């Protein structure tokens, strides 16, 4: 049989409906430039460059040497991990969670976005997605055949939802709404009033609120949980992660919390997609969750020093930013003289050999903004600052 007679093989429609993740493509480009000797300083992605505490690493090593710790583990995680997450929420957020019925460990909160979407969305269901916002909310919505509806977050409203706009949307179609505070990419902090209005809005329209909450400890002395609002558990799913708060991004240790019914639905999906995590990693995560306040204070001292250099970079680029931002990034509005965030980021990459993230990848409301990651050493940030000064003087 000749090859010409073979029927063309095509991917599923869902593959044609999404693009490769921006950072997946961009990091390949940067790797290629580095291989060619360009020495690019990456201030793009939010992957912590520091390691977990020594006792966390020691726990992993010790537990990995135990022969019986290498078998498959429960899909719901080991009891010790669920209990540790419960105590962590009580201690830092003032939220009491039942370790047996209201917590589900995850292999990363990005994976939890997929599990949640599969558990709640049928093809054609509507999803409210923030603009700007984490691109995975949109891509996963499309992958499961649901329809994204974007709600605006703008600087004039402190990057908080406009409830008048939300009420004007086709809410009869909406099943799920994504929120994320402290917000990525803008660093906006939530107010209790906004959280209360979100819960009231969700109950009135029978919408599930999925709150993605991985940044609450970074440069922030007041971690907040949406589950702290009375009655929130009836309509809210909150995801959290050790990636940023404990420098464990590559470990893929996360969780979600909600009412037992929602947890059970999500477990039905998750148990058919992935398995339990490596037991030594879960026991090490328990140790991480027991960290004293000094762990977070020391972490934020480091990020605080880095943030000061990032602010100098923004000033050198004539970008305007809000001093009250929290989280792993600095979000700045580009000068009116610049054509777009993409052209400015490309110019900085080409002429200064520094990669910053153009805000357009987070949605149309990010077109006039750039984002600088704090996940680089002070030395690298200062070198980036000097390169940009040289660029501006050329």
Image (cartoon, helix red, strand yellow):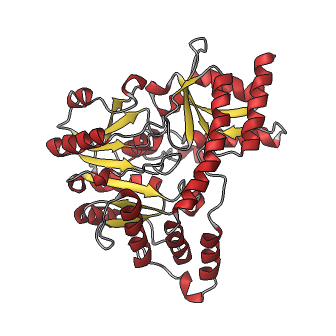
* Residue in front for this viewpoint, 390 or 224: 224
* Residue in front for this viewpoint, 35 or 94: 94
- Residue positioned most to the top: 337
> At which x and y percent is residue 229?
26, 51
Residue at (20% x, 53% y) in the render: 231
The image quarter containing residue 239 is: bottom left
* Position of residue 348 in the picture relative to residue 368 (left or right): right
- Residue positioned most to the right: 37
Residue at (53% x, 45% y) in the render: 219
* Residue in front for this viewpoint, 366 or 19: 366
> At which x and y percent is residue 221?
47, 49
Residue 226 shows in this picture: yes
* Position of residue 289 in the picture relative to residue 393 (left or right): left
> At which x and y percent is residue 272?
38, 67
Residue at (39% x, 22% y) in the render: 156
In which quadrant of the rendered image does the C terminus lie? Answer: top right
Question: Total label count?
Answer: 0
As drawn, 90 above or below 354 = below
* Residue in front for this viewpoint, 276 or 3: 276
* Position of residue 272 in the picture relative to residue 35 (left or right): left
Residue 2 shows in this picture: no
- Residue positioned most to the left: 204
The image quarter containing residue 167 is: top left
> At which x and y percent is residue 41?
74, 39
As drawn, 140 above or below 33 = below
Residue at (40% x, 78% y) in the render: 79
């Amino acid at each position: 049989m000749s090859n010409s007679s073979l029927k063309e093989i095509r991917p599923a429609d869902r593959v044609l409906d999404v693009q490769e993740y921006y950072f997946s493509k961009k990091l390949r480009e940067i790797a290629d430039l580095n291989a060619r000797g360009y020495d690019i300083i990456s201030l793009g992605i939010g992957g912590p460059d520091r390691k977990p505490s020594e006792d966390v690493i020691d726990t992993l090593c010790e537990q990995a040497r135990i022969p019986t710790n290498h078998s498959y583990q429960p899909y719901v995680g080991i009891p010790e991990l669920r209990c540790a997450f419960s105590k962590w929420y009580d201690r830092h957020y003032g939220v009491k969670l039942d370790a047996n019925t209201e917590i589900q460990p995850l292999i990363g909160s990005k994976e939890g976005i997929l599990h949640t979407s599969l558990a709640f969305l049928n093809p054609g269901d509507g999803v409210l997605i923030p603009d700007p916002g984490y691109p995975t909310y949109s891509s996963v919505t499309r992958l499961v055949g649901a329809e994204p509806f974007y709600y605006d977050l703008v600087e004039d409203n402190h990057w908080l939802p406009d409830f008048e706009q939300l009420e004007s949307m086709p809410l009869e179609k909406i099943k799920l709404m994504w929120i994320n505070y402290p917000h990525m990419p803008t660093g906006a902090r939530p107010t209790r009033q906004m959280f209360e209005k979100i819960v009231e809005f969700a109950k009135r329209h029978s919408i599930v609120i999925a709150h993605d909450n991985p940044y609450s400890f970074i440069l922030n002395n007041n971690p907040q949980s949406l589950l702290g609002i009375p009655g929130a558990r009836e309509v809210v799913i909150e995801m959290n992660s050790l990636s940023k708060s404990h420098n464990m991004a590559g470990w893929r240790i996360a969780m979600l919390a909600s009412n037992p019914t929602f947890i059970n639905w999500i477990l039905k999906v998750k148990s058919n997609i992935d398995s339990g995590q490596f037991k030594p990693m879960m026991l090490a995560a328990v140790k991480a969750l027991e960290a004293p306040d000094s762990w977070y204070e020391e972490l934020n001292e480091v990020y605080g020093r880095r943030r000061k250099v990032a602010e100098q970079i923004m000033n050198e680029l004539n970008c305007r930013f809000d001093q009250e931002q929290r989280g792993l990034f600095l979000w700045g509005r580009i000068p009116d003289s610049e054509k777009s965030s993409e052209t400015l980021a490309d110019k900085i990459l080409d002429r200064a050999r520094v990669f910053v993230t153009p805000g357009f990848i987070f949605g149309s409301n990010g077109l006039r903004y750039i984002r600088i990651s704090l996940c680089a050493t002070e030395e690298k940030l200062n070198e980036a600052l000097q390169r940009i000064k040289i660029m501006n003087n050329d």
